[in-house]
Amino acid sequence: MKLFIHTDGGARGNPGPGAIGIVIANEKKEIIKEIGKFIGRSTNNEAEYRAVVEALKACGKRKNLDIAFFIDSLLVVNQLNGKFRVKEPRMKKYFNEIKLLEKNFKSVKYTHIERFKNYAADKIVNEVLDNAR
């Protein structure tokens, strides 16, 4: 079984009020779950990482599951794929949590996409932030 997950995170003010948006689709590309969550004061990178953490947690523990992430943060994708080191201690905490959560699945892949292709997850982030006022 395979899931396709679009995640986004954002903070207005960077740092500032932050939120995450997650869209999970099945193999038929049908949306099976959407998650939007206010995360309080954060940076954009922190919000991006927290979106991946929440998405992995939402999938539970399923050793037969392949997960394909689509993320518009090139930095986060390169860090999760091991191309860039994670230097910031707060981000390293999320990175390590993600690497532990990955062990619950058959495979987890991270792909960078352009922001306009991440519209649904970005929309959720902005709706959460707009409603948090």
Image (cartoon, rainbow, N blue to C red):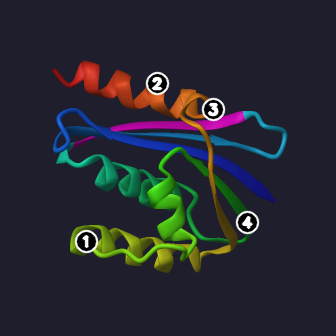
What secondary structure is marked by label 1? Answer: loop
Q: Quadrant of residue 53?
A: bottom left
Quadrant for the C terminus, please.
top left
Q: How far is mark 4 from mark 2, CA to CA?
A: 27 Å
Q: Amino acid at mark 2?
A: Lys
Q: Tag 4: Cα neighbours inside 10 Å, few (<14), some, or many (≥20)?
A: some
Q: Nearer the viewer, mark 1 or mark 4?
A: 1
Principal SS element in the magenta part?
A: strand
Q: How far is mark 3 from mark 2, CA to CA?
A: 11 Å
First-in-chain label (1 vs 2): 1
Label 2: which residue? 123
In this view of the protein, which residue sits in the foreground, 66 or 71? Answer: 71
First-in-chain label (3 vs 2): 3
* Residue at figure coordinates x 58%, y 28% from the top left: 116
Looking at the rendered structure, which numbered label has been put on residue 65?
A: 4
Q: Tag 3: Cα neighbours inside 10 Å, few (<14), some, or many (≥20)?
A: some
Q: Tag 1: Cα neighbours inside 10 Å, few (<14), some, or many (≥20)?
A: few
Label 3: which residue? 117
Q: From the viewer's perspective, is residue 92 above or below residue 38?
A: below
Looking at the rendered structure, which numbered label has been put on residue 88?
A: 1
Which region of the structure is painted magenta? Answer: 31-39
* Residue at figure coordinates x 58%, y 80% from the top left: 103
Q: Nearer the viewer, mark 1 or mark 2?
A: 1
Picture coordinates of residue 33, whole percent (x, y): 59, 38
* Residue at figure coordinates x 47%, y 80% from the top left: 100
Does the stretch in magenta take in 34? yes
Does the stretch in magenta take in 84? no
